[in-house]
Image: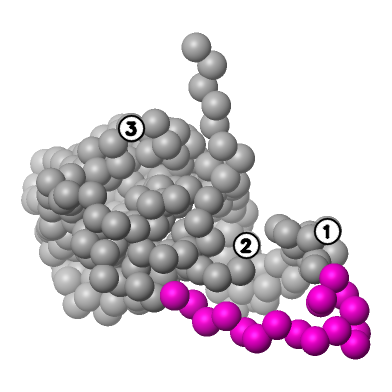
């Protein structure tokens, strides 16, 4: 049996591939030049590397004759059809997506400092983050394949439930480099590929894999997750304690005590997002109308 992995899943995994190398690069730049110069260097690198790619980008569909001809009468603008907001399936996916996005990014932000407070060498804190990004690559490919071939509600539940358990048991009880690595792998595999399922979410809501409204829904889910990411910043800052480990592993409490609030928050929002599996009980509804071309 040959597994056919759509190109889109591999494309999503590219973000994790970059995260495998960049932590080591940033560690060197930050230690040598500081964060001000590092940000300027990275900004220049992004412009230099991404600008040439814009020339190679081609439209998904060929340009119509009406658009090409300068004297042709242009078609009126077709506004987005928002009828999908009435779909119960959309409400379920939006609920799960928001709460998953509210907690997803926090482990990646706090893992390096957690490792340092655990008195691990700086290189090991960088390795943990790099392993998490590498695991996300396989998570995006794997969850993408599962969402295309299995019940999307069960795949969604598996992703969020495993993430919650990993946060509560592995991250919260981590007292060594090995346990942190185990958490980075499991969390990366389970939570790192969640965004790959947006395409499947869209096809379930619209009732058609080829519907143009799927692209609109992907944008909505991305915007929604961004809101959760923004809110997670001030929330996590308020939850991080001021106590720091004194280096004696035997005296360390749950989450080094300093990160206990953040860990409980991430685990809790992941558990809440698990409730989306209830959408499996919904009766199939008539698909909303798709976008007009």
User: What residue is drawn where x is 90% and y is 85%?
Assistant: 70
Q: CA distance from mark 3 to mark 1?
A: 35 Å
Q: Position of residue 220 (x, y in %)?
A: 41, 70
Q: Say above or below: 232 vs 105.
A: below
> Which residue carries the number 2 mark?
29
Q: Secondary structure at mark 2?
A: helix
Give the number of the mark in front: 1 or 2.
1
Residue farthest to the right, as pictured:
70
Q: CA distance from mark 1 to mark 2?
A: 31 Å
> Which residue carries the number 3 mark?
150
Query: What type of secondary structure mainly makes up the magenta span?
Result: loop
Q: Position of residue 127 (x, y in %)?
A: 46, 42
Picture quadrant where residue 148 is located: top left
Badge 2 density bin: few <14, some 14–19, many ≥20, Cα 10 Å: some
In the image, 218: left or right of 101? right
Q: CA distance from mark 2 to mark 3?
A: 44 Å
Q: Which circle's residue, 3 or 1, is located before the other in the chain? A: 1
User: What residue is drawn where x is 57% and y is 65%?
Assistant: 30
Give the number of the mark in front: 2 or 3.
3
Q: Position of residue 48 (x, y in %)?
A: 80, 67
Q: Say above or below: 262 vs 132.
A: below
Picture quadrant where residue 285 is located: bottom left
> Which residue carries the number 1 mark?
56
Residue 77 on the magenta span:
yes
User: What residue is drawn where x is 20% and y is 69%?
Assistant: 240
In the image, 173: left or right of 189? left
Query: What span is colored magenta in the figure?
Result: 65-81
């Amino acid at each position: 049996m040959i597994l056919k992995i759509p190109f889109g899943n591999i494309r999503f995994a590219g973000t994790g591939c970059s995260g495998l190398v960049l932590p080591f690069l940033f560690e060197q730049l930050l230690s040598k030049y500081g964060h001000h110069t590092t940000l300027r260097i990275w900004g220049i690198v992004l412009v230099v590397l991404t600008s040439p790619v814009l020339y190679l980008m081609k439209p998904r569909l060929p340009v119509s004759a009406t658009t090409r001809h300068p004297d042709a009468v242009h078609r009126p603008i077709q506004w987005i059809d928002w009828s999908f907001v009435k779909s119960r399936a959309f409400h379920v996916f939006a609920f799960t997506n928001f709460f998953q996005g509210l907690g997803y990014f926090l482990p990646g932000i706090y893992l390096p400092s957690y490792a340092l407070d655990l008195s691990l060498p700086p290189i090991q804190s960088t390795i943990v983050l790099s392993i998490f990004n590498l695991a996300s690559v396989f998570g995006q490919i794997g969850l993408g394949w599962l969402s295309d071939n299995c019940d999307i509600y069960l795949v969604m539940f598996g992703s969020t439930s495993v993430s919650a358990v990993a946060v509560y048991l592995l991250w919260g009880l981590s007292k060594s480099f090995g346990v942190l690595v185990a958490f980075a792998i499991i969390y990366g595999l389970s939570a790192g590929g969640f965004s790959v399922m947006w395409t499947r979410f869209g096809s379930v809501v619209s009732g058609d894999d080829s519907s143009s409204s799927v692209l609109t829904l992907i944008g909505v889910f991305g915007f929604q997750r961004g809101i959760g990411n923004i809110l997670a910043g001030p929330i996590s800052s308020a939850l991080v304690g001021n106590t720091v480990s004194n280096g004696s592993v035997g005296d360390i409490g749950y989450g080094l005590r300093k990160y206990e609030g953040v860990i409980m928050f991430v685990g809790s929002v992941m558990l809440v997002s698990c409730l989306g599996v209830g959408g499996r009980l919904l009766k199939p509804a008539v698909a909303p109308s798709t976008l007009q071309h």
